[in-house]
Image (cartoon, coloured by chain):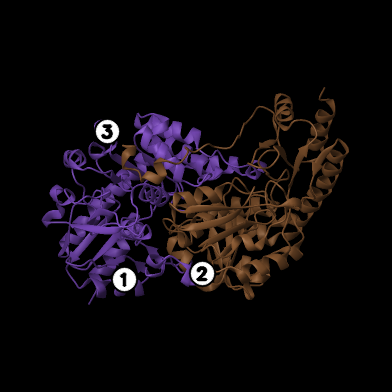
Chain colours: A purple, B brown
Amino acid sequence: MSRFVQPHIQAMQGYIPGEQPRGVGFIKLNTNENPFPPSPRVFEALTASIGDRLRLYPDPVATEFRKTAAALHGVEPDMILAGNGSDDLLTIITRAFVGPGDRAAFASPSYLLYSTLVSLQNGRTAVVPYGPGWSLDAGSFLGQGFKLAFLANPDSPSGTVQPRAWIAELAGRLDCPLVVDEAYADFADPDGHAIPLIADHPNVIVTRSFSKGYSLAGLRLGYAIARTEVVAELMKIKDSYNCDALSQAAGIAALRDQEHLAQNRARILATRRRLTDALRGMGYTVDESAANFVWATGGRPARETFTWLKERLVLVRLMSYPGFPEGLRITVGTDHEIDRLLELLREIP
Amino acid sequence: MSRFVQPHIQAMQGYIPGEQPRGVGFIKLNTNENPFPPSPRVFEALTASIGDRLRLYPDPVATEFRKTAAALHGVEPDMILAGNGSDDLLTIITRAFVGPGDRAAFASPSYLLYSTLVSLQNGRTAVVPYGPGWSLDAGSFLGQGFKLAFLANPDSPSGTVQPRAWIAELAGRLDCPLVVDEAYADFADPDGHAIPLIADHPNVIVTRSFSKGYSLAGLRLGYAIARTEVVAELMKIKDSYNCDALSQAAGIAALRDQEHLAQNRARILATRRRLTDALRGMGYTVDESAANFVWATGGRPARETFTWLKERLVLVRLMSYPGFPEGLRITVGTDHEIDRLLELLREIP
């Protein structure tokens, strides 16, 4: 019966879920989850929402959530679109702008989902390779009729950021929407955040996630920030009730506890500093990360190190991209978890 | 910036959320929510899931949920696909089979989402009108090169069902997938359920919802049942983590409490009987419903009745479809709610 599936989807690779071992004592430093729990206010909001009202549909447009996010960022509520994780928003955005045969651009190495989303639309992907020092040439995004461009900032696996001024220049020269995927922005310098660019650059769409900074990967919640007229178009595409009642309540509570976010952020940044320095001391090449992970290349062969660690119940992410050295993307865990990682790395015979 | 949106989406109507008044004492008989709370086991499962583990990604393929649903229906787990509400599944299915210019068929009047989903794919919609007594001509679905056909069973607003033998005949003659949308099947005769048809008809895809029978509209959970090879293709399209950790836990608990479902079902069926008879006694035309709502036409003008009720804080759904008399779709609420509705209907001057 798969013969009825659209040919370009038949031709795509099957879905391969990420490695999510459970209950066997792994130290998980492979999927950039936050090592610290969400705000206690989130738990209170969730507990208060468990009750008979779950029999009713949630607010289809997440009104209170939009107001809360808008107040935090100093924008209007109708510039906010809530999604079932930022993946839902990236899906909606791609469906809005990319049709069959259309070309969409993104840097590489970066989040692999962009390519999948463009392929699902039967679009064509155009890869802009990172240059030395994780620099990007804005010119490579131009003059090729792209219908959409993605930039993860901070990006993965590098953890590096492009400066706001560079993003402004790119947005100003692009003749298509520019998605700035800020899933990791909670760990970066706020001076680099792209949200203020929307005022002068109506083609900028910023996406945010609760999975990283807010420790809510299990809940699936994210939001996009864009011009009102863009959000109105994206609203046509989203599922009517794409965000459930519990995630809306939790999201509001999480946004309102910026102190909790700041505390966790400070702890992660301190550990990131220590991890970066220690890895460099062992001979790895590690760029300054603005995210909750670091990217380590050089040193011992990455694949062997990955296996050595996994056999000892520390899971990191082995990643290979054409034209780049294979490396390890290591999530910044708790100090205890990073101590164990470093201990094992020192023991490799 | 909306000029960058694909033209067929620009041309679509803006999103109009359903009427969801809150906190003003309305009796809500307009969106087919269950008037009774979910199983206490669901609350236990949710409470147990609120904790530090929410910082971790959920199981991307909902393994335990699939096993539980598969056991209930006597199918294999890899024939189950979990979704963020059955709308998510209908979106995924439409994206799998319908490309630009492709035609997809559905009965009318029925769930309006089918048309929206086909339009989002830049496909063409083909409407098969119901005939007298809510009958459908299988021949109308044939010989027109359809890429996908939808049948809600029970359907809305009629509440009526097509017999399983008729669906089997249609599936056997169709040269495309047939989605049997069983969102309301928990209130119908199980002898009419389409799941057993999948064995002989590999083009049948059944979708189920937790919003109606299981009283979990606020949680967003549904599942599709189809051949393994179909589910494998649909997996390519779904967002990686489309179902959050809480809804997976709640869904498992709900499926395991079939006694709770049966009790609520029995109460709703008894009230449905009483509501149907009372409306008929007042001169309305009401078909025998197999769902948790009834469709009332004739009697007093529907629009006036709708307004009369709404002014008195009873909300029903006024629906108009070309070629059919305007009518009221009335959700089967509690006995108390239906008593109030009937009292008001008798008072209309």
Which residue is at the front of the view, A291 or A80?
A80
- Left or right: residue B293 versus residue A344 is right
Q: Which residue position holds label 1?
A: A309
Residue B26 falls in which quadrant of the image?
top right
Give the residue type at disc 3. Pro
Letter of the chain that mark 1 sits on in the rendering: A
Which residue is at the front of the view, B345 or A55?
B345
Spot occupied by residue A47 in the image (x, y as percentages of width and height): 58, 43
Residue at (70, 54) in percent of width and height: B154
- Check the picture and name the quadrant holding the N terminus of chain B: top left
- Check the picture and name the quadrant holding the C terminus of chain B: top right
Residue at (70, 26) in percent of width and height: B307
Query: Which of the two discs, 2 and 1, sits closer to the camera?
Result: 2
- Left or right: residue A139 versus residue B192 is left
Please tell me whether residue A16 is drawn above or below residue B265 in the rendered image: below
Please tell me whether residue B91 is drawn above or below residue A23 in the rendered image: above
Query: Which of the two discs, 3 and 2, sits closer to the camera?
Result: 2
Spot occupied by residue A296 in the image (x, y as percentages of width and height): 21, 62
Q: Are marks 3 and 2 in contact (CB under 8 Å)?
A: no
Among all residues in the image, which is located at the extreme left? A132
- Left or right: residue B263 versus residue A226 is right
Give the residue type at disc 1. Leu
Q: Which mark is residue A196?
A: 3
Instruction: Check chain identity for marks 1 and 3: say if they share one.
Output: yes
Letter of the chain that mark 2 sits on in the rendering: B
Give the residue type at disc 2. Val
Label 1 vs label 3: CA separation?
42 Å
Spot occupied by residue B288 in the image (x, y as percentages of width and height): 80, 50
Instruction: Check chain identity for marks 2 and 1: say if they share one.
Output: no
Spot occupied by residue B9 in the image (x, y as percentages of width and height): 41, 44
Q: Which residue position holds label 2?
A: B230
Residue at (33, 51) in percent of width and height: A98
